[in-house]
Amino acid sequence: MASKLLRAVILGPPGSGKGTVCQRIAQNFGLQHLSSGHFLRENLKANTEVGEMARQYLEKGLLVPDHVITRLMVSELELRSGQHWLLDGFPRTIVQAEALDKICDLDLVISLNIPFETLKDRLSRRWIHPPSGRVYNLDFNPPHVHGIDDITGEPLVQQEDDKPEAVAAKLRRYKDAAKPVIELYKSRGVLHQFSGTETNKIWPYVYTLFSNKITPIQSKEAY
Ligand code: G5P
Ligand code: MG
């Protein structure tokens, strides 16, 4: 098994299960799960300069400008240069992919292809725990107690831009922006695409893919 540090990316539209799959990969393989949306929300809460630059875009469900998100993610990656990591939500545009290209070589890129109706249903049933970024779904992975985070006992909230109209617009923007990114990674031979409506059915394939690159930290695959 290679001892080289693993650099992986998960691409997929809003609600496609990037966060869910990343949580499982992180748990099974000990990779750092780095979510661009989570970093942005943390900066927003802390009223940092980046948070202020991103606020109006996040509130409207729009993509944050490339230079803002790239600066943020590059500095987070520099802090973790000695660890295996997995990016969730970055890069989302070709400009971001080119910036990432300058600082590392990716080993694995996963693209999740999930039908639109599935995405709409999922997002309207989603609740999150803002301080940690933990994600729940009322059907798929409900919290033990309704409206309460399993780990901290703090309240869960529903995000404004999880409404169906917001989801439709986000999905259109995702497709336009992601197309050249997917083409780039396909041409590099690192892209693996998974289609389906259920994360549980996609997960065993993702697990096998990672097992071929990095030793699991627990002997049997866990959800
Ligand atoms: P985020 O935070 O990256 P999105 O919109 O890309 O947000 P999101 O909504 O977080 O992505 P996800 O991570 O792909 O979706 O999916 P998830 O949260 O794991 O799963 C969605 C729901 O479905 C959950 O409730 C989950 O439990 C459930 N689920 C999962 N699998 C199944 C299943 O099999 N069955 C069922 N029934 N349910 C399931 O970005 C937020 C904002 O930040 C900015 C943008 O403004 C963005 O809108 N941003 C950037 N801007 C520019 N460039 C970037 N690189 C940016 N990154 C973030
Ligand atoms: Mg997410």
Image (spheres, rainbow, N blue to C red):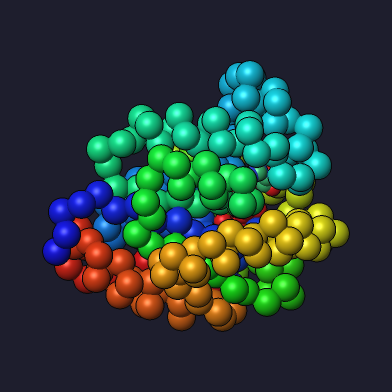
Nearest the eye: 132 or 115: 115
Residue 108 position, x and y percent, is 38, 62
Q: Can residue 95 be seen in this view?
A: yes
- To which quarter of the image does residue 167 belong? bottom right
| 1 in relation to 75, above or below | below
Is residue 131 among the parts visible in the rendering? no
Q: Which quadrant of the picture is home to ligand 1? A: bottom right
Would residue 99 appear left or right of 206 to someone viewing this image? right
Write down the quadrant of residue 140 in the picture: bottom right
Residue located at (14% from left, 64% from top): 1
What is the x, y in percent for residue 217?
20, 58
The picture places residue 205, in percent across and down from the top left corner, at 38, 78
Q: Which residue is drawn at 55% across and 30% down?
A: 71
- Front one among 5 and 126: 5
Q: Residue at x 28, y 60 (%)?
A: 28
Query: Residue 128, image x and y in percent?
Result: 59, 48
The correct choice, above or below, for 62 with respect to 208 in the image is: above
Q: How many marks overall?
A: 0
Up the image or down, 47 lies above or below 145; here it is above
Q: With 183 as the anchor, is 204 left or right in this view?
A: left
Task: Farthest residue to the right: give it.
Answer: 165
175 vs 140, left or right, is right
Quadrant where the C terminus sits is bottom left
Q: Which residue is drawn at 50% across and 52% down?
A: 88
In this image, 13 relative to 105: left or right?
A: right
